[in-house]
Amino acid sequence: MTSQPDAVFLDGLDFFTGAVGRLNASDWERPSPCEGWRALDVLGHVGAAVEFGTLLLIDRHPAWSPLDPPGGAVEGEPTAWWDALVEPARRAVAGVDLAKVVDSPMGRRPVGEGLSFPALDLFVHAWDLARSVGEDVEVPAAVIDFARAVIDPLPEAAVRNDRVFASPVPTPAGASPSQAFIAWTGRDPRSSPVAGR
C-alpha cells in the first residue's frame, strides 16, 4: 500500500532535520550536488517551500517569491532557522484534510497532491545536504515506492526539467535501492562535492 503524502511529509521533516544536523557552522558554504547551489541554498530552498506550504495550509495565502540564490531566505543561524520552521509545519500537516482544495502556484488542487512533491523534496535534498559534507543517507524504500507512484504517471516533460529532476544518471553497478533512486533523480550517487571535512 502506498504511503499517504501527509505521512511521507512528516517523516521527511525528521529526515531532513537529521541531515541538517550533519553540518557544522563552517559547512553551509560548501558546494552541494545541486549545480550552482551551496548547502545553504539547499536549506533555503527547502525551508522557503516548507514555510510557504505551512502558510497555505493555515489559509494565509502567501505569495510565492523564491529568492536567487535560495540561501538568501535563511535568516540567522541556519540550523536554528530550520528548526523554527519544523513545528509549525508539523502542526499544519498533522490531521489535514488531503481532499481539501486550495490555491497554489500550480493552480487549485487537493492538499494531498500539493504535498507530494514537497514531501519527496525533503528526502532528496537531505541527500544533497549530506553529500555536501561527503556523507551519505539512505532514502527509505517506502519513500522510493511513493516517489515512483507519484511521478511515474506524469508526462516526462513535467518531471525532467530545470525545476524538478535532471535526466537520470546511469545506475552504478552494485548500487543500493537508495543509490539507484538518487541516480533516477538525476544525481550521481558516487560523486561528492567534497572529500569529507
Image: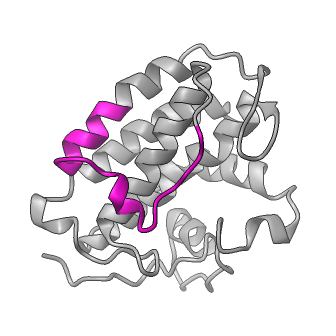
Q: Residue at x 25, y 47 (%)?
A: 75
Range of magenta residues: 63-85
Query: Is-magenta flag for residue 73?
Result: yes
Tell me the residue at 33%/71% (across/down): 131
Q: Nearer the viewer, residue 81 or 124?
A: 81
Which of 65 and 83 lies nearest the eye of the viewer?
65
Q: Quick check: 98 above or below 146?
A: above
Q: Is residue 91 above or below residue 118?
A: above
Residue 110 lies left or right of residue 88; in this view the side is right
Q: Quadrant of residue 33?
A: bottom left
Q: How many numbered marks appear? A: 0
Residue 41 x/y as whole percent: 37, 64
- Work out which quarter of the rendered image holds the N terminus and state it: top right
Lateral position of residue 52 relative to residue 36, left or right: right
Side (left or right) of 47 relative to 21: right
Residue 75: in magenta span: yes
Q: Nearer the viewer, residue 195 or 173?
A: 195
In this picture, residue 157 sits left or right of residue 63: right
| Residue positioned 62% across, 20% down in the render | 59
Residue 103 figure quarter: top right
Query: Which residue is rendered at x = 52% and y = 55% of the image?
Result: 66
**Does 89 sit above or below residue 8?**
above
Up-down: is 34 above or below 3? below
Q: Position of residue 167 (x, y in %)?
A: 68, 81
Residue 135: x %, y % from top left: 27, 68
Q: Is residue 73 visible?
A: yes
Image quadrant holding the C terminus, namely bottom left
